[in-house]
Image: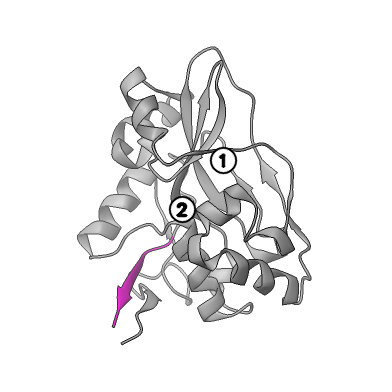
Amino acid sequence: MTKKIIIEREPVKWNFGLVTLEPFDVAKKRLEQAGYHIPSLEENAELRIQEGENSSVCNLGNYVSDGVLYVPQRGIFWTPNSPIMRNPEQATQCHRDGSEFYLTPEQVEAGLVGAVKINSEPIPTNRFGENEFTAKCFGKNAQAYGKFLRNSKYKIKEMPIWLVYISNKPFARQLWFSKLDDGSELFDANRSLGDGYGFRGVKRIS
């Protein structure tokens, strides 16, 4: 039987699906206690295709479980193994204190597993299936999500990516998946884990 992603219906901040406005550590714990999780980019893209361009999933941005690593001498990387997901309380407190979430060498190496080097060049939506980054982060949904963006009422031809500069110490940021009328852009959400932006809970049902 085909599996389908659904979004949590309670607690509801607005009248369209779950978007909690809580700090990252609190939101992550709440979702997991309720049997939900913060979606990956691959899951979130699938959910957007499923729900359609006029849904709240497409008209509101949210954090995803993917992260960005800034590693001196090596580069900037998208990672499916975000160190912030593994250390939510510590990372959120760093942002509350106005600091980056700096990484140990062990955290860097763990985060680089399955990672892909990225830059701030926009990615054409008709190349999602062949671009190394989008093919990896959107997985089996890459080509379909690119087509979904091109065929939407916004006619999105390329997806922007917003990053910051590498510092002299490695650090991680969490990715924000923007709404469709912002071009479905990806950006690393600044040091905002403690500010209570949008977290969406998802789970799969048969």
Residue 185 vs 203, above or below: the answer is above
What is the span of residues highlighted in magenta in the rendered image? 200-206
Q: Is residue 63 above or below residue 200?
A: above
Looking at the image, do the residues carrying marks 2 and 1 touch, with CB atoms under 8 Å apart? no
The structure residue drawn at horizontal position 66% and vertical position 53%, both measured from the top left corner, is 185
Quarter holding the C terminus is: bottom left
Taking depth in this image into account, of 134 and 190 the one nearest to the observer is 134
Q: Identify the residue under disc 1.
A: 188
User: Is residue 63 in the magenta section?
Assistant: no
In the visual, does 85 lie left or right of 198?
left
Residue 157 in view in this figure: yes
In x, y percent, where is residue 104?
Answer: 35, 19
Tell me the kind of residue under disc 2. Answer: Val
Q: In the rendering, at what x and y percent does residue 111 appear?
A: 39, 34
Position of residue 12 measured from the top left corner of the image (x, y, whole percent): 39, 70
| Of pointers 2 and 1, the one earlier in the residue sequence | 2
Q: Residue at x 54, y 49 (%)?
A: 176
Residue 64's label in the rendered image is: 2
User: Residue farthest to the front?
Assistant: 130
Q: In front here: 17 or 188?
A: 188
Residue sitting nearer the eye, 105 or 200: 105
Q: Is residue 201 above or below residue 76?
A: below
Q: Amino acid at mark 1?
A: Asp
